[in-house]
Amino acid sequence: MYNFFNYFFFTYLIVLLSIILWFSYNLKLEKKIRLKNVKDLEDE
Amino acid sequence: MDLLKLINKELRAEILNKEIIITMLSFGLSIIVIISFTSNLSKQIIEAYAPGLFWLMILFVTVLGVHRSYAYEKEFNAIDLILSAPIDRGLIFIAKALSGFIFITLMQALIVFPYFIFLSIDIDVNFFPLILSTLLINLTLMFVSNLISGISMRARISEILFPVLLFPLISPLIIAATNITNSIINQAPYIEWQVWIYLLISILIVFGLSGYALFDFILEE
Amino acid sequence: MFYENKKNLYLLIVAIFLFALNSLNIFYGTPMVPDQHWAQKIFYLHVPSAWVGFLSYFIAMISGFTFLSTKKDKWDIIGTACAEIGTLFMSLVLITGPIWATPIWGKPWIWEPRLTTTLILFLTYVGYFMMRSFGGNIERVKKTSAVIAIIAFLNVPIIFFSVQFWSPELQSHPQVEMNQQPTGILIPFLISLFVFSFIFFVMLSYRKYVISINKNLTNNV
């Protein structure tokens, strides 16, 4: 591509998606751990 | 002195069953043979690549040898016995590094001849700087390898963890070693490759000091 | 939940807002360099990622030291969080680097000092994560991973200088000097740097929290 826009856009998408995916992974993990901790407390 | 006693122990254990040297030698020889089979290159290319290939082989052999030397300690839990002795634990690191240095130097002295014969390399070298720089490289190599081997020793997968940890951290040393040997073989004046010697000395100081200071934490159970 | 706390939620929203502003600035507010056009703008993403990665590994080294001297778990948690986030950003550097290099320099990868240092640090931290997952006894794993974090970062100047002296012909690829850029490029770059650092601290505080509430600590923390 003469103006190389595709290169930049692809790079930007990679950076954006990885940060978003990181946050969503950690949010899901937190929910799962909270549920597990509550269940452990109930079992005791 | 404690350090001398520790080195004495390593050397005597080795003289008794000669395990480390024989492992290193046989592995080195097999690497040389395999390299000869996989390279049907012209003589000039092999002679140009010869120093790098030599240090590559020494690196692989070191991985095996140092891992073996620490595996000794794991058998019968010998490491816990040493740790219960009232000695400075950093000295264990230095003793292992120095004894490893003796082993690898011995092994190199023996492996050089098959290396040159099997790969048909014909090089005119100026021996004195070559031997001195090789000794320095061996010493640095052993200090770095022993520190990393101490770190990975107690893990279950220490056999794979040790090379995985070692190779990235040893890259500057390999770059320096290859450049020094190349420069000596091409008979470049000392001023051109002295920067690599300084780099080696700084690696030696950094890893030696961190090993001496941190070995206490590494070896604790 | 962590983000039910008003302060944390506020910081997250500020981070999202800043990132959006920064992206708009990169798209519309930066001058277009002739010959390189849009590919040059990858610079505003690539270099701040590298900066955040190195900052993260630096904090990992400091918390390694502090963990070894105070033995408080809090520092191990910070170290692990920094290692993870740092590795994430370093992978971004290693992915965006070749994408940037292909239109600008022609080849995807050259052995220049900063990229090589990034690669070696990344590989060292691969070993760090292997140690954390497969190392065995968790208390020992914490100490050894602190040591790995320390020597990984101590190695950075060594690697940098060794690659710099390694092949002078590689230096013909011009390194981007920060303080010689015209203001049209320097100011958006500094803004991007600030935004990435802000996002890094938001990510760090969240990851620290997630690791610490995992009470049944398995080796896969």
Image (cartoon, coloured by chain):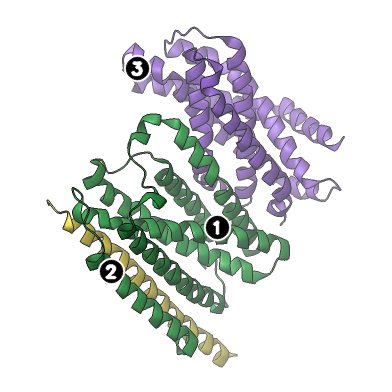
Chain colours: A yellow, B purple, C green
User: Identity of the amino acid at label 2?
Assistant: Asn
Marking on residue C58: 1
- Tell me the residue that label 2 is attached to: C25
Q: Secondary structure at mark 3?
A: helix
**Along the viewing direction, whichever of C36 and B141 lies nearer the viewer:** C36
Say which residue appears at 21% left-offset and 50% top-offset.
Answer: C36
The residue at the far bottom in this view is A42
Marking on residue C198: none
The vertical placement of B172 against C87, above or below, is above
- Spatial CA distance of label 2 from label 3 is 52 Å
- Which of label 2 and label 3 is nearer to you? 2
Same chain under badges 2 and 3? The reply is no
- Across and down, in percent, residue C179 comes to 41, 52
Tags 2 and 3 in contact by the CB under 8 Å rule?
A: no
Q: Quadrant of residue B121?
A: top left
- Circle 3 packing at 10 Å, graded few (<14), some (14-19), many (20+), is few
* Subunit that carries the residue with mark 2: C
- Circle 1 packing at 10 Å, graded few (<14), some (14-19), many (20+), is many
User: Identity of the amino acid at label 3?
Assistant: Ile
- Tell me the residue that label 3 is attached to: B45
- Which of label 3 and label 1 is nearer to you? 1
- Spatial CA distance of label 3 from label 1 is 42 Å
* Subunit that carries the residue with mark 1: C
- Spatial CA distance of label 1 from label 2 is 29 Å
Q: From where the camera sits, is residue B206 visible?
A: yes
Q: Secondary structure at mark 2?
A: helix
The vertical placement of B69 against C72, above or below, is above
